[in-house]
Image: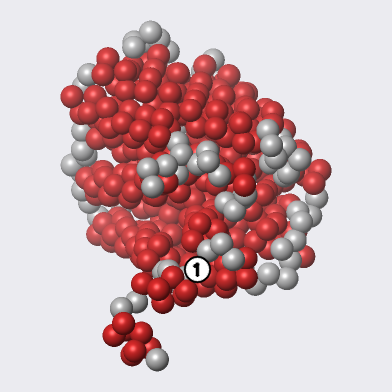
Amino acid sequence: MRARSYSPLTLCFTGLTWLTLASILGLAILIGLVHGTPLPSWVRALHVHAVLIGGVAQIILGGFLLLIVPPQSKVRMGSDSHPITLLALNGGLVGMLVGFWLHLDWFVSIAGFVVIVGFLSAIHSLWTRAQQVWNSSLSHSWYYALAFFGLVSGSVCGELMTLGMIPESYGYVRLAHIHLVVLGFVVPTIIGMMHHLLPIVWGAPLADQKLVQLTTIFLPIGVVILIGGFLNSSVPVEMIAGAILFMGVGLLTSNLFRTWLTSTHTGSAASDHLFVSTFFLLFTIVLGVLVGANHLSDPPVLPYGKLHLVAYTHMAFIGFIVNAIMGACSYLIPVTLAAGRVTSHKKRSVYLDQLTSMMNRWGSVQIATLSLGTMGLGIVATLTWNVPLGSIYVQSAMWACLILLLTSYVLFSIKLSAIMAKQPEHLAAQQATPDELKLTA
C-alpha cells in the first residue's frame, strides 16, 4: 500500500489538485485586474509556479510514467513507487510559494533546488523505463532528451534569477526561463503524447510518419532560435523562431487532421480534447509572432497591457495545455484504473468500456465551454481597446468567460470522481451487504 501511494497516478491526481487551486487563484487575479484592483505581483508568482510545477509538470511526468509502459505490463511491477519525485516536487513547491510570499529569494532558491531534484528523479525513472521500449512510437530518444533538458535548464535559469547572479539581463532571462519550460518541455512532451495516444484512440495509424519526423525537428530548432532571440533582445530573431514553430505545429495539425479524416472513430473526450488543443497551439504561435511585430515600432502599434498578456498566455495555458491534459487524463486514467482493479482481460475490457463511457458523457459541452471560455479571454482584452476597463461590456464578458471555464472544469472533476468511485461489478458485489444482495436478487 505504501508503494501505491507514490504511484504515477498519484502524481497525476496531485497535479490536478494543484491545477485546481492555482486556477482559483488565477480567477482572483483576473477579477482584480478587470476591477482595477490588481493583486500584488507575488500572488502572480504563486499562481504561475503552482500551475507549471505543481500542476502541468507533475501531471506530464506522471502521465509519461503511465504511458511509456502499459499499466498492465510486467515491467511496471515492483518499480511503480516514486517517493522522491512526489515529495520533492510538492515539498519544494510549497517552499517556493512560502518564499515568494515572504519575499525571501534565498528560500525560493533552496526550494527550487529541491524541485529540480524531483525533476531529475522523474527523468531517471522515465529514462530507465524508456530503454526497454525504444522500438515503440516513443522511440525518439533525442527528442525527449531535449525536452527534459528544457525542463532542467529552464529551472536552472529560475535558480540563477533568485540568486541574483544575472540582474542586468533579468527580463530576457525570465522570458528564457518561462519559454524553456513551456516551449522546451511542456509543448514537445504533449505533442509526443499526441503522436502516441491519438492513433490508439482513433484506431488508425498517423497519416504520414515523415511529418512526425519533421515536427520533432522543427520544434527544437524553433525553441533554440527563440531563446537566442530573447537573450540577444532581437525581436526579428524571435519572429523567425515563431515562423519555424508555426511550420512544425502546422505539420502536426495537418497530419492529425488527415488521420482523423481516414479514421472511422466517432470521437471521444480524449481525442477531441487533444485534437482541439493543437488548433489553440497554432493560434497562440500566430499571436506570439504578432505580439513581436507589434513591438517592432516604438511606441507599439496597438496598446499592450497586462490584460492582453493574460489573454495571450492563457490561449496556450488553457486552450492548449489544459485541453491536452484533460484529453490525456480521459484516456490514461480509465486505462490505469481498469488495469489495476481487474486482472481478467475479458472483465477488464468491460470495466474499461464503462469508465470510458463515463468520461465521454457531456464531452461536447465540456470541450465547447473550455474552448469558448478561453477565446472569450481574448475578447475581454480586445474590448479594452475601445471601451474603459470598468465598462459593463468588459465586466459581463469576463464573468461569462469565468462561468464557461468553471463549467468545463466542474464537469471534468465530477467525472473523474465518478470513475474513481466506480468499482468493477464483481468487486462491488463482494463489498455489498447481505441486505443489499437480497434487494438486488
- Which percent across, then down, holds residue 351? 53, 70
Tell me if I can see residue 209 in this picture.
Answer: yes
Q: How is the image coloured?
A: secondary structure
Which residue is rendered at x = 62% and y = 65% of the image? 345
Report which residue position mark 1 lands on.
355
Q: Secondary structure at mark 1?
A: helix
Q: Is residue 392 above or below residue 96?
A: below
Dot 1 surroundings within 10 Å: few (below 14), some, or many (20 or more)?
many
Please tell me in which quadrant of the rendered image residue 293 appears. top right
Camera-side residue: 78 or 214?
78
- Which percent across, then down, holds residue 117? 43, 23
Camera-side residue: 431 or 193?
431
Camera-side residue: 53 or 354?
354
Which residue is rendered at x = 76% and y = 40% of the image? 135
Which residue is rendered at x = 50% and y = 68% of the image? 355
Please tell me in which quadrant of the rendered image residue 211 appears. top right
Q: Is residue 120 left or right of residue 221?
A: left
- Which percent across, then down, holds residue 13? 39, 49
Which residue is rendered at x = 21% and y = 33% of the image? 40
- Which percent across, then down, holds residue 217? 72, 33
Tell me if I can see residue 68 in this picture.
Answer: no
Q: Is residue 217 left or right of residue 312?
A: right
Which residue type carries mark 1? Answer: Leu
